[in-house]
Image (cartoon, rainbow, N blue to C red):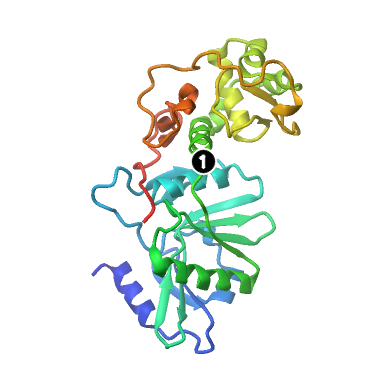
């Protein structure tokens, strides 16, 4: 048995508050397991800086496996155990209220009514700007995990409510929205902001909502400008309707813009793909999303070719 496995075994056998309270198990900077009263740990431990308390499982035969997600929020990699979790990381990485992210940094322990010790390791931790946090699981479908997962969700939700945090089982995203996020995620790295002054020119070009390609061409060569536009869309400095397939005439506007329904200039008129011959789309993507999202799998690597981690699979 590994040292981590032995620590998990000891934690599972350790006494938990007989009054029905919760305890937390996490790894210290030396990689040693620490068990502490949950309410105390929540106040003092920076879970967003911790490694996984236990490894994500590898499921033979699955297309995706555990890997790493480079976070634009933190500038560091976050462990991800499934494709469903990686997509939720994209959503939280774009959330301006999120300041920290971590994969499986804490195990919660509690006693059930019959006195048996139970434990659960939420897949995802997100620190908010106000100091509170979200613990979350990312099921690939609503029934994933069965009764054990449902019972654990109730317990973890109570543990979070006790300290003013939140627990959620995050539902899968719509295929088109997921594909659009994957595409934009490929441009999340700061290097895509381009030369000095380019971002300012891009924002100026989209002061009023206009088709993506028109605003891009107003700034310069689309090959040089489009990465900056996508970078601004990822960071919500520009906005568009991500629930419809991205294409070169989709309407793009400033951050405060309320949506395509308030603008003119040919909303939703497809005008060809921005990039062709970029590989097959993932199984399950809506056919109409392929204008731009066929290259969504490119978001699995950091821009510039650095591998962001093994592709991740369906939640278990």
**Picture layout, residue 215 above or below residue 54:** above
Left or right of residue 31: residue 233 = right
Label 1, on which residue? 174
Answer with the quarter of the image where residue 51 lies: bottom left
Q: Secondary structure at mark 1?
A: loop
Q: Nearer the viewer, residue 50 or 122?
A: 122
Q: Is residue 174 above or below residue 202?
A: below
Residue sitting nearer the eye, 290 or 194:
290
Q: Is residue 43 left or right of residue 276?
A: right
Please name whichever residue, 167 or 151, is drawn nearer the observer in this view of the structure.
Answer: 151
On screen, residue 300 above or below 209: below
Quarter containing the C terminus = bottom left
| Residue at 35% in and 41% down | 311
- Residue at 69 percent across and 58 percent down: it is 130
Residue 189 is left or right of residue 253, and the answer is left
- Quarter assignment of residue 30: bottom left
Residue 224 visible in the snapshot? yes
Q: Is residue 147 above or below residue 55?
A: below
Q: Quadrant location of the N terminus?
A: bottom left
Quick one: 2 or 136, which is closer to the camera? Answer: 136
x and y, in percent, of residue 48 in the image:
53, 57
Tell me residue 55's x, y (percent): 35, 59
| Residue 240, x across and y down, in percent | 64, 29
Q: Is residue 121 left or right of residue 154?
A: left
Camera sees residue 107:
no
Q: Position of residue 262 (x, y in %)?
A: 76, 27
Instruction: Tell me which residue sits at (55%, 21%) in the image.
Output: 247
């Amino acid at each position: 048995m590994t040292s981590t496995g032995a620590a998990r075994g000891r934690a599972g056998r350790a006494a938990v508050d007989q009054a029905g309270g919760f305890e937390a198990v996490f790894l210290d900077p030396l990689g040693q397991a620490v068990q502490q009263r949950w309410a105390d740990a929540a106040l003092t431990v920076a879970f967003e800086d911790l490694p996984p308390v236990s490894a994500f499982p590898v499921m033979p035969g699955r297309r995706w496996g555990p890997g790493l997600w480079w976070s634009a929020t933190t500038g560091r990699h976050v462990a991800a155990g499934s494709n469903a979790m990686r997509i939720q990381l994209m959503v939280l990485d774009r959330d301006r209220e999120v300041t920290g992210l971590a994969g499986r940094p804490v195990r919660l322990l509690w006693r059930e009514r019959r006195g048996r010790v139970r434990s659960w390791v939420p897949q995802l931790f997100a620190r908010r700007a106000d100091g509170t946090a979200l613990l979350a699981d990312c099921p690939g479908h609503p029934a994933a995990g069965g009764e054990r997962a449902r019972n654990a969700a109730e317990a973890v939700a109570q543990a979070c409510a006790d300290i003013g945090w939140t627990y959620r089982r995050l539902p899968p995203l719509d295929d088109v929205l997921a594909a659009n996020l994957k595409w934009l995620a490929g441009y999340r790295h700061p290097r895509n902001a381009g030369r000095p002054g380019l971002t300012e020119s891009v924002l100026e070009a989209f002061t009023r909502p206009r088709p993506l390609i028109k605003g891009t061409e107003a700034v310069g060569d689309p090959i040089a400008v489009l990465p900056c536009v996508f970078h601004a869309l990822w960071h919500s400095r520009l906005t568009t309707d991500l629930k419809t397939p991205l294409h070169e005439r989709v309407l793009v506007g400033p951050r405060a813009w309320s949506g395509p329904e308030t603008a003119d200039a040919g909303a939703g008129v497809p005008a060809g793909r921005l990039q062709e011959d970029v590989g097959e789309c993932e199984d399950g993507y809506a056919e109409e999303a392929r204008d731009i999202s066929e290259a969504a799998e490119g978001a699995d690597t950091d821009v510039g070719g650095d591998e962001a981690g093994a592709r991740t699979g369906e939640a278990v």
